[in-house]
Image (spheres, rainbow, N blue to C red):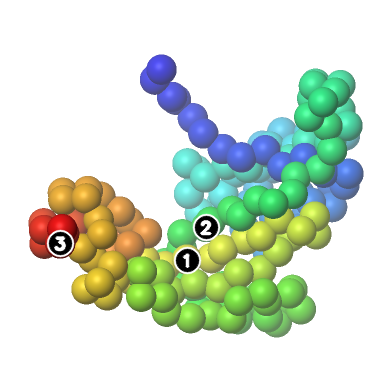
Amino acid sequence: MKTTSYYPVLMTGDVAGTADFYIKHFRFEPLFTSGWYVHLRSSEDRRVNLGIVQGDHETIPEQGRGRTSSLLINFEVRDPDAVYERIVAAGLPVLHTLRDEPFGQRHFITRDPNGVLIDVIKAIPPSPEFQVQFVEGSTASWAIAGDGGPSRSLPPASPRPG
């Protein structure tokens, strides 16, 4: 299968309110708007898309209807500190404060009005103990970019013991 596009679609009881949240706080813009579905695209990167659908709409199979839960969306950004300041100033919930993680992330977590978790991330170099866990030659922007730039290959990992 050759995938030509990939984006999450959040099921909700409040399509307009959810779309407004992502437009206001995460700089998305609407590409398509109807009463039951909104398709958003990042105003900063046209490859980043998000769909929002009425959770009980007839296009959703009956057994799958409802609202999205137990989901964590990651947004990789150049400056999580600036986004964090905006989120705090807007009074949004902060579930994890801004922090550096040894596995290679500077991030914080908030949530949308539906309870969907949003992890705002900047890749930073991982600690040596996490560095060796990457497959040799792999590309992992979330673990090494550090400058918010494009993904680059990791240096060869040391052999794993035993």
From the top left corner, tell me how far across and down residue 96 is, in percent: 61, 76
Q: Nearer the viewer, residue 85 or 138?
A: 138
Q: Nearer the viewer, residue 62 or 4?
A: 62
Which disc number belongs to residue 121? 1
User: Is 160 above or below relative to 86?
Assistant: above
Residue placed farthest to the front in the image?
A: 162
Which disc number belongs to residue 77? none
Q: Amino acid at mark 1?
A: Ile
Residue depicted at 74% across the width and 49% down the height = 69
Q: Nearer the viewer, residue 92 or 134?
A: 134
- Secondary structure at numbered mark 2: strand
Disc 1: CA contacts within 10 A as few (<14), some (14-19) or many (>=20)? many
User: Is 9 above or below relative to 22?
Assistant: above
How far apart in space, not on screen, are marks 3 and 2 (Cα)?
A: 34 Å
Q: Amino acid at mark 2?
A: Phe
Locate residue 29 relative to residue 123 in the image: left or right. right
From the top left corner, tell me how far across and down residue 157 is, in percent: 14, 59
Q: Are marks 1 and 2 in contact (CB under 8 Å)?
A: yes
- Secondary structure at numbered mark 3: loop
From the top left corner, tell me how far across and down residue 131 is, in percent: 23, 65
Locate residue 121 relative to residue 89 in the image: left or right. left
Pointer 2 residue: 75
Residue placed farthest to the top in the image?
A: 1
Disc 2: CA contacts within 10 A as few (<14), some (14-19) or many (>=20)? some
Residue depicted at 51% across the width and 34% down the height = 6
Which disc number belongs to residue 161? 3
Disc nearer the start of the sequence (3/2): 2
Q: Nearer the viewer, residue 65 or 162?
A: 162
Quarter in which the N terminus is drawn: top left
